[in-house]
Image (cartoon, helix red, strand yellow):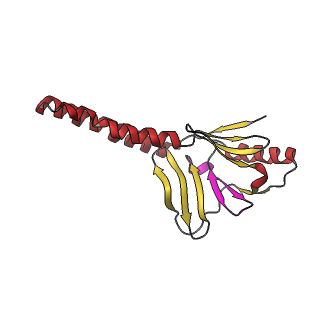
Amino acid sequence: MPAFFPARLAPRQLLLSQTLAYGVGLALPALVGIIFAAVYGEYWALALPVPFAMVLGIAASFRPRGFLVDAQRIAVVRTIGPITWPLSDVAILRAPPVWGPTKPLALMATRGLFGTYGWFWNRDWGAHRIYMTDPDEAVEIELTSGRHIVVTPASHRDFVAAVRDAAKNAGIAIQIEQ
């Protein structure tokens, strides 16, 4: 039976996302557009929120909505489609993650708007993926290839237990470090 764990934004990330996305990203350009249209008769200014809405839509479609564990895989559930890793490719689960001493550089990622997610790089892990919405619930997944993935299911303890149970039922050995 698949187990689904929602990706809830931590209060700080929720406030940041709502303030930036809806306040600065949509309300402010809409207000400026209305003022320009009313005062100067420049009705094209009413379209100012459109590019911001497009950027927000793209960011929202890539953000993690949740994490799925079933008998064969671990998946990051997103609007545009899931990202999956076979359970047999998982070598180690760490909760909390053992972060390297250097802060990761974003290769193709976003930080702050709807969480921190995408491709990152640092000297210790090399290229790795992060799908983080609540840093307090972070779980590091180390694959047999040496790649690292950080996910933040709503309950990291239940997530680790679900992965452990799925691996045990499939006859796969996964090292769990807590």
The picture places residue 57, in percent across and down from the top left corner, at: 44, 38
- Identified at 76% across, 40% down, the residue is 70
- Identified at 59% across, 63% down, the residue is 127
The picture places residue 90, in percent across and down from the top left corner, at: 75, 55
Does residue 74 appear to the left or right of 132 in the view shown? Answer: right
Q: Nearer the viewer, residue 21 or 170?
A: 170
Instruction: Examine the image and state in which quarter residue 76 appears.
Output: top right
Residue 112 painted magenta? no
User: Could you tell me if residue 49 is visible in this image?
Assistant: yes
Residue 138 painted magenta? yes
The residue lying furthest to the left in this view is 40
The picture places residue 154, in percent across and down from the top left corner, at: 63, 41
Q: Nearer the viewer, residue 16 or 163?
A: 163
* Highlighted range, magenta: 133-151
User: Could you tell me if residue 177 is visible in this image?
Assistant: no
Q: Quadrant of the N terminus?
A: top right
Is 52 above or below relative to 151? above
Instruction: Examine the image and state in which quarter residue 158 appears.
Output: top right
The picture places residue 82, in percent across and down from the top left corner, at: 62, 41
Q: How many marks?
A: 0
Q: Quadrant of the C terminus?
A: bottom right
- Identified at 62% across, 54% down, the residue is 150
Does residue 63 appear to the left or right of 171 in the view shown? Answer: left
